[in-house]
Image: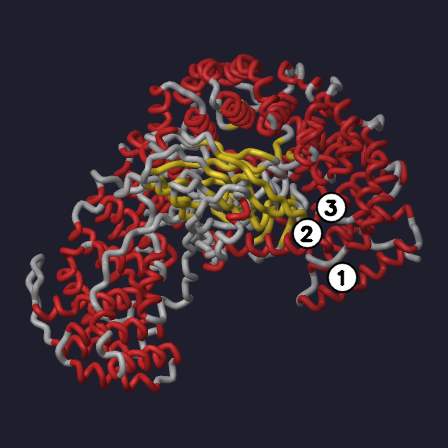
């Protein structure tokens, strides 16, 4: 996977993860292109596109579009499963996740993603393992906060 | 200084902004506060401020002033600080900024931290955005962690190692010992990431590949356990146990089994098992089946298995789920070369997909349909394709039209059918036909001598109906100019000849000249056509009048033509019949590469579609000049013909028109073995490297490697040129395995005295790095005395800024090439 983007129907970016070094200007261009392409798609069309030399896989969940760019030898159908798994992980963590959760807790969304994918590849295939590590890491953080007796941010 | 506001507070505030300007104001205020807080070196709130900065960065505002702060957070002892710091580093920093190198030390310390979550953060960051320098410095630490027994760290280290290898391939060797018992892990996370690591190593190094072949039995066993084992709640997805791992193992098996009989045999059973036992009701199952099919097609599987695979794809085509149909079409496209017959069986389903509503599916179906056209099904397929051309979206029309022309040319059952098909395309999609088709069509028409009368008649009738489609009008006016006498004399055999007078014909042509719908190019065509009719028709005075009127036309091109034609009438009337007589049959020149439709993405704007076309054949300057230097003492004459440069418009002078047309070769009867661009051509995508047709064409003469030095490899492939058996047509393929492009690449050749050599223009003069593409060039060698072919070649190119020159002798031509 080269990148993963989450954006709303109104074109607001909610998460961006780049797995290869890309310049800022290029990132903006890619984001703009992805939004244009994906938001223009008919509601019941297939979830795959071709763009430049990449395969784009996207899926809409409620008001958010999950969009990833794959290399040519990646399996598109599996990518759909990867996106779905990520949504499930978010759902488990936030409990019935909605877009607002991801807006106000964007850093947590990134942390969960980092426990699931590294360098564009799946790191852990067990849902339970990912949520367990998130829980423990959060505990580590909270312990610190209690110690300092104030919220960190 | 009051405590800076909290992150959630800020987010809430910003969301209340009603206009972009209001939001910008808030952001600017907050940025100013954050900046002053940074200046004060406030440790307590740094974390909060950076978090806010990251939020604003996501909204699109600049946040580079936070980069150093991220580094300070990473260096802090607090876990929360580190978490935000590393996130900031991944979002704000990349290897382009020198600042990122300062992270290296922190990461190194954190990789040895006592808390596994801190180690995890460091591994994650390194694995996502580590630069080559960082990777080089820290590879040792990663390797250590790869051997730990802590599965949490081990899996992260494995993916980090993958990243290191991608960045610095030379370090691959370092990780080899650690891979020894990776596959005996029970933990799925470690197993999965290990398979990814092994895949990466095998893809990059043939030595590693042969080393890891011995793992095939183990992988087969793991896969078997996954399938056979009962329900495992932890890894279950819709009834399938750990599909992610299954797919990755299948992919690794594909790489290990490719080209190796023993390994392929070892996996036959498990592949058959997966193919038959996997649930297909959900996307997950189909994902696994898809990967299985790709694997079966790539390894040396037995034919029964291959048929099974194609049938799975056939079943996919009938699936309700659009995604699966799309994936099936894409895979069939890859396999259509090697398993042509098996794919043919599904032809009707594929043709039905042309009527699908989904744009992506239609495009794939169209490409696949063109690949499936052959001599047997041409009539039926063409009917469907023409119907598709009529009803499809404009974005498809150009590609479809080109495809139809190509297919018609290869497999036309009769000339009349061919002409009819061309007419149909011109009349229905005439304005979408590519400009370069016009000369191709004209050449085609010229070559079907017996059909001239029929052709011109049909074109004339089409013109009467509609003069808006420029390619149609151009071809028609050219034909009328050439064969107008046949039109007027009513000689058509194929259908009822129409009664047409010379005046009527001239009316039509003059109509084109004055019509607003005609482009300048079209006008040029019609003026020339009118002029040609002066030798074929009797009403010369009328023609003289028309020509003299345009002598003062505003359009410079028309004016020039008219003035010269006028001169023909006045001073050079004796030359006129000779100049304007019928065109001879044009010989098709071989082109450098297939001109079939390239895999374009119709979903994007046309500018992107343009870049995906094969680069136009460029005409370099005369290459013959230095060739005699090449040969040192030998006195070997070299005959080089250069192609005159193609003028931008379709021909100025009459003579240019002739030159123009002879340049435009139609597509070669057999496509050249490799496409001279780095963009994938659907014929050569993926699985098999030998296109079917290529085997037929070069079956007689095996290809050879002529030169292989310093990363530049030049292969020769051979064809016999019909009708002259003394001419060998050699296509050179230059590929470059170095890690930088070779620019200004020039290939020159010289042959002994008894031979004649003709070098056509190359596909490009840049040979892309790392074998991403090849440059091809066609050489024609005339060998009337059937002597042994020898050649001296000279190569010049620029690699990494320095020019390189080399001479070589090629003596290892296969005997069939010159006998």
Residue shown at 7%/67% (left/top)? B490
Residue at image mark 1: B27
Can residue B315 be seen here? The reply is: no
Q: Quadrant of residue B520?
A: bottom left
Q: Chain of mark 1?
A: B
Q: CA distance from mark 2 to mark 3?
A: 8 Å
Q: Which subunit holds the residue at mark 3?
A: B
Q: Quadrant of the C terminus of chain B?
A: top left
Instruction: Assign the N terminus of chain B to one quadrant of the image.
Output: bottom right
Chain under disc 2: A
Q: Circle 1 — which element?
A: helix
Task: Name the front one of labels 2 and 1.
Answer: 2
Q: Secondary structure at mark 2?
A: loop
Instruction: Reply above or below: B23 against B510.
Output: above
Residue on which the image places disc 3: B94
B711 sits to left or right of B817: right
Left or right of B674: which side holds B148? right
Do the dots labelled 2 and 3 sit on one chain?
A: no
B535 or B178: nearer the viewer: B535
Where is mark 2, residue-wise? A23
Question: Residue B364: which quarter of the image?
Answer: top left
Q: CA distance from mark 2 to mark 1?
A: 23 Å
Residue under the point 83% across and 32% down = B108
- Tell me the crowding category of disc 2: few under 14, some 14 to 19, or many 20 or more residues within 10 angstroms, Cα based: few
| Crowding at mark 3 (Cα within 10 Å: few <14, some 14-19, many 20+) | many
Identify the residue shown where x is 60% and y is 53%. Answer: A31
* Residue B805 visible from this viewpoint: yes
Of labels 1 and 3, earlier in sequence is: 1
Q: Position of residue B656 (x, y in %)?
A: 35, 66
Query: Is B599 located above or below residue B785 in the figure?
Result: below
């Amino acid at each position: 996977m080269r990148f993963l983007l989450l954006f709303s129907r109104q074109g607001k970016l909610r998460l961006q993860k780049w797995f290869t070094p890309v310049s800022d200007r290029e990132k903006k261009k890619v984001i703009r292109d992805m939004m244009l392409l994906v938001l223009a798609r008919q509601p019941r069309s297939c979830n795959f596109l071709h763009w430049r030399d990449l395969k784009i896989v996207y899926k809409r969940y409620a008001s958010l579009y999950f969009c990833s760019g794959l290399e040519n030898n990646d399996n598109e159908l599996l990518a759909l499963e990867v996106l779905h798994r990520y949504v499930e992980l978010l759902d488990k963590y936030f409990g019935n996740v909605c877009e607002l959760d991801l807006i106000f807790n964007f850093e947590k969304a990134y942390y969960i993603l980092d426990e699931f994918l590294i360098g564009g590849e799946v790191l852990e295939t067990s849902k339970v393992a990912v949520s367990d590590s998130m829980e423990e890491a959060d505990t580590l953080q909270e312990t610190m906060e209690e110690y300092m007796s104030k919220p960190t941010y | 200084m009051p405590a800076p506001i909290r992150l959630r507070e800020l987010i809430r505030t910003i969301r209340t902004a009603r206009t972009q300007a209001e939001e910008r104001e808030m952001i600017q205020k907050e940025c100013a506060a954050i900046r002053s807080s940074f200046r004060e070196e406030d440790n307590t709130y740094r974390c909060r401020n950076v978090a806010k900065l990251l939020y604003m960065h996501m909204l699109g505002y600049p946040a580079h002033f936070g980069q150093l702060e991220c580094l300070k957070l990473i260096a802090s002892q607090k876990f929360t600080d580190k978490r935000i710091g590393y996130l900031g580093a991944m979002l704000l920093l990349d290897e382009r900024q020198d600042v990122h190198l300062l992270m290296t030390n922190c990461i190194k310390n954190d990789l040895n931290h006592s808390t596994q979550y801190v180690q995890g953060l460091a591994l994650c960051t390194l694995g996502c955005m580590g630069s080559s320098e960082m990777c080089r410095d820290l590879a040792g630490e990663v390797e250590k962690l790869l051997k730990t027994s802590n599965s949490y760290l081990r899996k992260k280290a494995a993916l980090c190692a993958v990243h290191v290898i991608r960045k610095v391939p030379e370090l691959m060797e370092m990780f080899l010992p650690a891979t020894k018992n990776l596959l005996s892990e029970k933990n799925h996370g470690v197993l999965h990431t290990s398979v990814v690591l092994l895949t990466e190593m095998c893809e990059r190094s043939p030595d590693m590949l042969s080393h890891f072949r011995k793992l095939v039995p183990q992988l087969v066993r793991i896969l078997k356990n996954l399938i056979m084992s009962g329900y495992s709640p932890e890894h279950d997805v819709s009834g399938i146990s750990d599909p992610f791992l299954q797919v990755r193992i299948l992919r690794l098996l594909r790489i290990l089994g490719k080209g190796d009989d023993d390994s392929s045999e070892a996996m036959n059973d498990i592949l058959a098992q997966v193919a038959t036992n996997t649930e297909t009701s959900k996307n997950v199952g189909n994902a696994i089946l898809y990967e299985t099919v790709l694997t079966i097609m790539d390894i040396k599987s037995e034919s029964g298995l291959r048929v099974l695979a194609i049938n799975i794809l056939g079943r996919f085509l009938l699936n309700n789920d659009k995604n699966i149909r799309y994936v099936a079409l894409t895979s069939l496209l890859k396999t259509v070369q090697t398993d042509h017959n098996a794919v043919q069986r599904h032809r009707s389903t594929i043709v039905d997909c042309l009527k699908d509503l989904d744009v992506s599916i239609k495009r794939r179906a169209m490409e696949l349909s063109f690949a499936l056209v052959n001599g047997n099904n041409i009539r039926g397929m063409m009917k469907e394709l023409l119907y598709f051309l009529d009803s499809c979206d404009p974005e498809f029309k150009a590609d479809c039209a080109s495809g139809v022309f190509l297919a018609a040319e290869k497999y036309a059952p009769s000339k009349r059918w061919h002409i009819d098909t061309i007419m149909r395309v011109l009349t229905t999609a005439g304005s979408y036909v590519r400009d370069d088709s016009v000369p191709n069509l004209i050449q085609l028409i010229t070559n079907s001598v017996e059909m001239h009368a029929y052709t011109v008649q049909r074109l004339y009738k089409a013109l009467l109906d509609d003069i808006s489609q420029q390619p149609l009008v151009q071809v028609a006016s050219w034909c009328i100019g050439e064969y107008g006498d046949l039109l007027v004399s009513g000689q058509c055999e194929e259908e009822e000849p129409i009664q047409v007078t010379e005046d009527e014909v001239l009316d039509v042509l003059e109509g084109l000249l004055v019509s607003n719908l005609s482009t300048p190019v079209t006008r040029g065509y019609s003026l020339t056509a009118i002029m040609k009719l002066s030798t074929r028709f009797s009403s010369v005075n009328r023609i003289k009048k028309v020509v003299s009127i345009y002598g003062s036309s505003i359009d410079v091109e028309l004016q020039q033509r008219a003035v010269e034609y006028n001169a023909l009438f006045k001073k050079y009337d004796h030359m006129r019949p000779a100049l304007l007589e019928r065109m001879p049959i044009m010989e098709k020149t071989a082109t450098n590469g297939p001109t079939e439709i390239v895999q374009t993405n119709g979903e994007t704007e046309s500018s992107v579609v343009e870049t995906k076309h094969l680069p136009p054949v460029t005409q370099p300057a005369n290459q013959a000049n230095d060739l005699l230097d090449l040969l040192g003492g030998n006195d070997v004459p070299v005959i080089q013909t250069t192609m005159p440069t193609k003028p931008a418009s379709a021909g100025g002078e009459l003579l240019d028109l002739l030159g123009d047309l002879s340049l435009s070769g139609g597509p070669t009867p057999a496509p050249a073995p490799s496409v001279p661009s780095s963009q994938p051509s659907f014929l050569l995508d993926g699985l098999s490297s030998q296109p079917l047709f290529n085997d037929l064409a070069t079956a007689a003469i095996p290809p050879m490697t002529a030169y292989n030095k310093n990363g530049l490899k030049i292969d020769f492939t051979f064809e016999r040129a019909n009708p002259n058996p003394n001419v060998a047509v050699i296509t050179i393929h230059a590929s470059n395995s170095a890690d930088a492009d070779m620019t200004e690449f020039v290939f020159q050749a010289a042959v002994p005295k008894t031979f004649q050599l003709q070098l056509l223009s190359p596909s490009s003069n840049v040979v892309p790095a790392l074998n991403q593409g090849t440059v091809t060039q066609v050489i024609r060698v005339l060998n009337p005395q059937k002597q042994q072919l020898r050649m001296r070649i000279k190569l010049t190119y620029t690699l990494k800024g320095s020019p390189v020159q080399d001479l070589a002798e090629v003596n290892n031509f296969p005997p069939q090439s010159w006998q």
